[in-house]
């Protein structure tokens, strides 16, 4: 079974920084894309940043220049460095892995439980 666990969230003042981590356990045959999403009450979950198995990255316009997504394959961990945080960044942040566990199954989305990020003065 594939499990993802986020950590690093908390309360921070506007302009501050946080680094989120997503640790994976369980085996995956191949990974197509990994990413971070966020969600606030009453709104749909939105994409924040993605990184492919080849290292290509993509960011939402609202976080470009402030957030950086990265991964450490040896540690089975993905990170989201968040700088210059704004109140609008307040949300529950979820990590996602899109991949397949074996050649006999199609690629699926795997999600963590989420970690709360609150930006407030």
Image (tube, grey):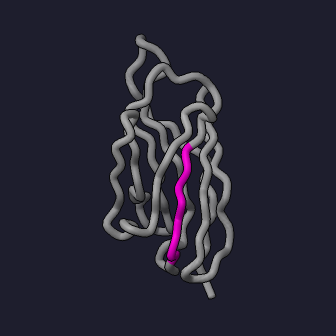
Q: Position of residue 6 (x, y in %)?
A: 63, 50
Residue 55, image x, y percentages: 38, 40
Residue 121, placed above or below residue 3 = below
Q: Position of residue 41 (x, y in %)?
A: 52, 68
The image shows residue 77, relative to residue 104, as above or below, that is below
**Left or right: 29 as drawn, with respect to 75:** left
Q: Which residue is at the front of the view, 111 or 60?
A: 60
Give the residue displayed 54% in from the left and 72% down from the top. 90
- The span shown in magenta is 78-85
- Residue at 36%, 48% (x, y): give it: 57
In the picture as drawn, the residue positioned furthest to the top comes out as 104
Confirm whether the magenta stretch covers residue 81: yes
Along the viewing direction, whichever of 21 and 108 lies nearer the viewer: 21
Rendered-image quadrant of the C terminus: bottom right
Is 53 on the left or on the right of 117, as rendered?
left
> Residue 104's spot in the image, x, y percent?
42, 11
């Amino acid at each position: 079974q594939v499990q993802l666990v986020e950590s690093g969230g908390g309360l921070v003042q506007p302009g501050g920084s946080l680094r989120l981590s997503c640790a994976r356990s369980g085996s995956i045959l191949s990974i197509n894309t990994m990413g971070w999403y966020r969600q606030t009450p009453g709104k749909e979950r939105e994409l924040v940043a993605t990184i492919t198995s080849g290292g290509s990255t993509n960011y939402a316009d609202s976080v470009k220049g402030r957030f950086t997504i990265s991964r450490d394959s040896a540690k089975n961990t993905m990170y989201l460095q968040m700088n210059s945080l704004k109140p609008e960044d307040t949300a529950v942040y979820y990590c996602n892995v899109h991949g397949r566990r074996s050649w006999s199954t199609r690629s699926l989305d795997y999600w963590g439980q989420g970690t709360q990020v609150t930006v407030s003065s």
